[in-house]
Amino acid sequence: MKSDNVELIERFRAAARKFIEEVDSAPQIDTEPFLANVGRSMAELYWVALTLPDVQPETDGTDETPFQTETWGKLRHSLQEKIGPLDTYWEIFDSTEKQEPVQGSLAGDISEIGLTALDGSIPQRAITQRLRSLAICFRSAHL
């Protein structure tokens, strides 16, 4: 692996750790500062993820459950309680393509990113797409 890539990966890991720290701080702080902190650390994680090189997976198969569902469910539930009515959002869709609107969950997305970003169990492209959706959501909420 090139030394440039090692540095980029280390920056991604540092940004992921910061994101995890912000998610873990949820019980200690109020909702608005929590969402603002998560939004900032998510933007940093998103920016760093965009700098990562594209890579090809070593296998053709995918693991549909990249993390423990029970762990994700507990984290998602605690974040839903923290975020309250601000938890749900509408994902961007193209009505000219006759797509149905899809409702998303900040708690679900934050917990998914938090549990997968550090161990690399989902592809960088998938993390980047989820972060992009969340960044749009956070921006539209003016947080």
Image (cartoon, helix red, strand yellow):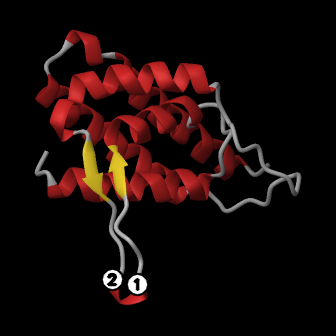
Residue at the extreme bottom: 96
Q: Which mark is residue 98?
A: 1
* Disc 2 packing (10 Å; few <14; some 14–19; many ≥20): few
37 left or right of 130 in image: left
Separation of marks 1 and 2 at Cα, in angstroms: 5 Å
* Whether residue 122 is situated above or below residue 128 in the rendered picture: above
* Whether residue 51 is situated above or below residue 143 in the rendered picture: below
Who's the residue at 22% across and 50% down the image?
138
The kind of residue on which mark 1 rests is: Lys
Dividing the picture into quadrants, the one containing residue 52 is bottom right
105 left or right of 66 in image: left
User: In the rendering, at what x and y percent does residue 131 appear?
Assistant: 42, 52
* Whether residue 20 is situated above or below residue 11 in the rendered picture: above
The kind of residue on which mark 2 rests is: Ser
Could you tell me how many numbered marks the image carries? 2
Q: Nearer the viewer, residue 140 or 124?
A: 140
User: In the rendering, at what x and y percent does residue 28 appear?
Assistant: 23, 10
Q: Nearer the viewer, residue 133 or 84?
A: 84
Of the 4 image quadrants, the one containing the C terminus is top left
Who's the residue at 67% across and 43% down the image?
6
Q: Which mark is residue 95?
A: 2
Dividing the picture into quadrants, the one containing residue 107 is top left
Residue at the extreme top: 28
User: In the rendering, at what x and y percent does residue 3 appear?
Assistant: 71, 47
Who's the residue at 33% across and 68% down the image?
92
* Disc 1 packing (10 Å; few <14; some 14–19; many ≥20): few
User: SS class of the residue under badge 1?
Assistant: loop
User: SS class of the residue under badge 2?
Assistant: helix
- Whether the residues at callouts 1 and 2 have beta carbons within 8 Å, the answer is yes
Q: Nearer the viewer, residue 108 or 42?
A: 108
Who's the residue at 33% across and 83% down the image?
95
